[in-house]
């Protein structure tokens, strides 16, 4: 069933949706980051359906969503001082913390790890569903495994309709990128996946922060990784993608034009508003991803723009990269995976 809650949440329908969750069914719902495909996290069979619907590898664990902070102690234990500080500062919000797991959480959720990823979303619809269903909800992003995450129902309907019992439409998601994922190791927060909550914000709270070395790099074979999700292809449309990323505007435009020529114009450009008149491609082949000085806008539009570009079936999608600072860290982390590390930037030019 499709439920339109773009304007207001409907209490009667909320009851129906929460009953579906309690009865072990799958529900797609919005959060402030991206859409989630959720099931009762305590019901092994229900969680199994998520992996099947997404085609997700079974060794990639899920984030468990909670209605409020009191619920954390029901699913996790031995919370340290630093972890508590992070909980107090960033929950509810676009922030996921890896904690020591309690046995109430089935193995299928954590892929057998002794930790569990916890998030409390800050979105009226998500919190309504979590509160009234009364159970923790395991919910990865609503998309087929490997594809860009879903930030609007229009984008994911084709992929997942028929595989879930309900789709709740809350309009476009606010942030557009998945949560920041953090694991505290020896009292130091390690960012496993960057997001809206930036390293600077975490450092302010914990006094120290580290970025996992894989955030901008391809995983090598047999490399030890903290988060199973890191090793899989992610955020990628069908079409080949390339990121072009120079600080100097003239360089940026030069290398963009060179790539357009290389592909004889059969490209789609995901470019900044500022460059719309400066990068020449045929009509409808320039998708404006927002101002280069407004990364919130770029993050919010990113996945929808990738899907739009993919639908046009060019030979290649050329994407303007951003500065790797603040929210730009999260955007570049996603883009590098989107383009399978085909990124042209300073120091990578072959003359
Ligand atoms: P998704 O729900 O698809 O946005 O992805 C959740 C991310 O969190 C994936 O990259 C997972 O590998 C990661 N994750 C979930 N649980 C854990 C855990 N217990 N330890 C480390 N990473 C985790
Ligand atoms: Mg995902």
Image (tube, helix red, strand yellow):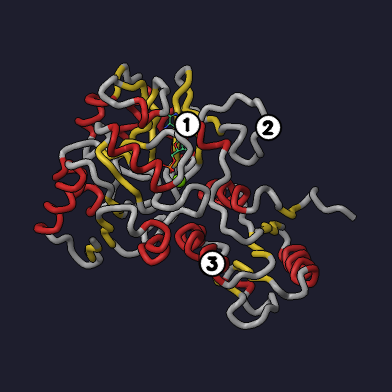
For label 1, the residue is 59
Mark 3 / mark 2, whichever is N-terminal: 2
Report the front residue among 259 and 203.
259
Q: Is mark 2 within 8 Å of ligand 1?
A: no
- Secondary structure, mark 2, is loop
Q: Relative to residue 180, is residue 227 depicted above or below? A: above
Residue occupying image coordinates x 32% and y 20%? 79
Residue occupying image coordinates x 58% and y 72%? 312
Q: How many marks?
A: 3
Give the image location of residue 19, x and y in percent. Answer: 14, 47
As drawn, which residue projects farthest toward the bottom? Answer: 283
For label 3, the residue is 289
Q: Relative to residue 260, is residue 28 depicted above or below? A: above
**Quarter the C terminus occupies:** bottom right
Rendered image: mark on residue 220: 2
Q: Relative to residue 113, is residue 327 depicted above or below? A: below
Report the front residue among 323 and 72.
72
Give the image location of residue 153, x and y in percent. Answer: 35, 63
Residue occupying image coordinates x 38% and y 56%? 160
């Amino acid at each position: 069933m499709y439920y339109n809650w773009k304007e207001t949440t409907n209490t009667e329908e909320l009851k129906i949706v929460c009953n579906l969750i309690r009865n072990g069914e799958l529900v797609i719902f919005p959060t402030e980051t991206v859409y989630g495909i959720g099931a009762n996290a305590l019901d092994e069979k229900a969680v199994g359906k998520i992996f099947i619907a997404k085609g997700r590898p079974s060794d990639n664990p899920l984030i468990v969503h909670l209605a409020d902070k009191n619920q954390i102690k029901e699913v996790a234990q031995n919370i340290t001082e630093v972890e508590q500080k992070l909980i107090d500062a960033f929950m509810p919000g676009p922030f996921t913390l890896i904690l020591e797991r309690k046995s109430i959480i089935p193995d299928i959720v954590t892929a057998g790890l002794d930790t569990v990823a916890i998030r409390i979303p800050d979105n009226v619809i998500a919190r309504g569903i979590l509160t009234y269903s009364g159970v923790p909800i395991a919910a990865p992003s609503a998309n087929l495994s490997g594809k860009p995450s879903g930030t609007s129902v229009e984008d994911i309907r084709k992929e997942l309709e028929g595989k879930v019992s309900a789709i709740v439409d809350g309009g476009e998601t606010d942030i557009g990128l998945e949560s920041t994922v953090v694991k505290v190791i020896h009292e130091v927060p390690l960012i496993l996946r960057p997001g809206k909550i930036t390293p600077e914000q975490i450092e302010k709270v914990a006094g120290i922060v580290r970025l996992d070395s894989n955030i901008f790099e391809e995983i090598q074979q047999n490399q030890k990784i903290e988060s199973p999700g890191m090793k899989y292809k992610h955020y990628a449309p069908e079409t080949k993608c390339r990121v072009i990323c120079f600080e100097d505007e003239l360089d940026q435009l030069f290398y963009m034009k060179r790539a357009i020529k290389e592909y004889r114009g059969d490209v789609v450009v995901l470019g900044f508003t500022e460059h719309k008149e400066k990068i020449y491609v045929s009509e409808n082949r320039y998708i404006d991803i927002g101002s280069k000085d407004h990364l919130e806008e770029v993050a919010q539009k990113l996945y929808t723009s990738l899907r739009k570009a993919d639908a046009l079936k060019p030979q290649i999608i050329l994407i303007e990269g951003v500065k790797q600072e603040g929210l730009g860290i999260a955007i570049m982390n996603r883009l590098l995976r989107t383009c399978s590390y085909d990124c042209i930037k300073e120091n990578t030019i072959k003359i």
